Amino acid sequence: QVQLVESGGGLVQAGGSLRLSCAASRSIFRFNRMGWYRQAPGKQRELVASITSGGSTNYAEFVKDRFTISRDNANNTVCLQMNSLKPEDTAVYYCNGDFLMWGRSSNYWGQGTQVTVSS
């Protein structure tokens, strides 16, 4: 079983920063891709950023130049540095990963961490 555990959410004022971490119970080298999604009340879950095992990154347009996704291979952690936060960034942020085992990929989600940005 693979577990993803998020941390680092909280309340911050607009313009502030937060750093989210996603700790994986297995080596992140076994994840073909890991990403961060978010879901605001009444809205669909949407991709924020993703990173492949090779280090290639992808960002949603609404977070480009503000958020940075990174991998800490030594600690099996994927982080999301969020700067210049806006009230519209308020959401539950979820970690997601495609875990490879025996040639098959299985998708896993974390439990989510709340990010609230006050104006």
Image: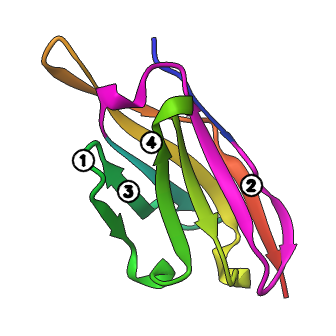
Which residue lies most toward the front here?
Answer: 74
Task: Name the mark nearer the viewer: 3 or 2.
Answer: 3
Query: Can you give x and y, in whole percent of width and height, for residue 25 in the image?
Result: 53, 20
Report how far apart the C-alphas of labels 3 and 2 lie in the structure: 19 Å
Which residue is identified by label 1? 54
Give residue 114's mark.
2
- Quadrant housing the N terminus: top left
* Quarter of image, res 67: bottom right
Type of residue at label 4? Answer: Asn
Task: Name the mark nearer the viewer: 4 or 3.
Answer: 3
18 part of magenta stretch:
yes
Task: Name the mark nearer the viewer: 1 or 2.
Answer: 1
Report how far apart the C-alphas of labels 4 and 2 lie in the structure: 15 Å
- Quadrant housing the C terminus: bottom right
Say left or right for 114 vs 48: right
Q: Secondary structure at mark 4?
A: strand
Q: Secondary structure at mark 3?
A: strand
Which residue is identified by label 4? 96
* Quarter of image, res 60: bottom left
- In terms of depth relative to the viewer, which is nearer, 116 or 67? 67
Type of residue at label 2? Answer: Gln
Report how far apart the C-alphas of labels 1 and 4 lie in the structure: 17 Å
- In terms of depth relative to the viewer, which is nearer, 111 or 67? 67
Report how far apart the C-alphas of labels 4 and 3 lie in the structure: 9 Å
Which residue is identified by label 3? 50
Q: Earlier in the sequence, mark 4 or mark 3?
A: 3
Magenta range is 7-32
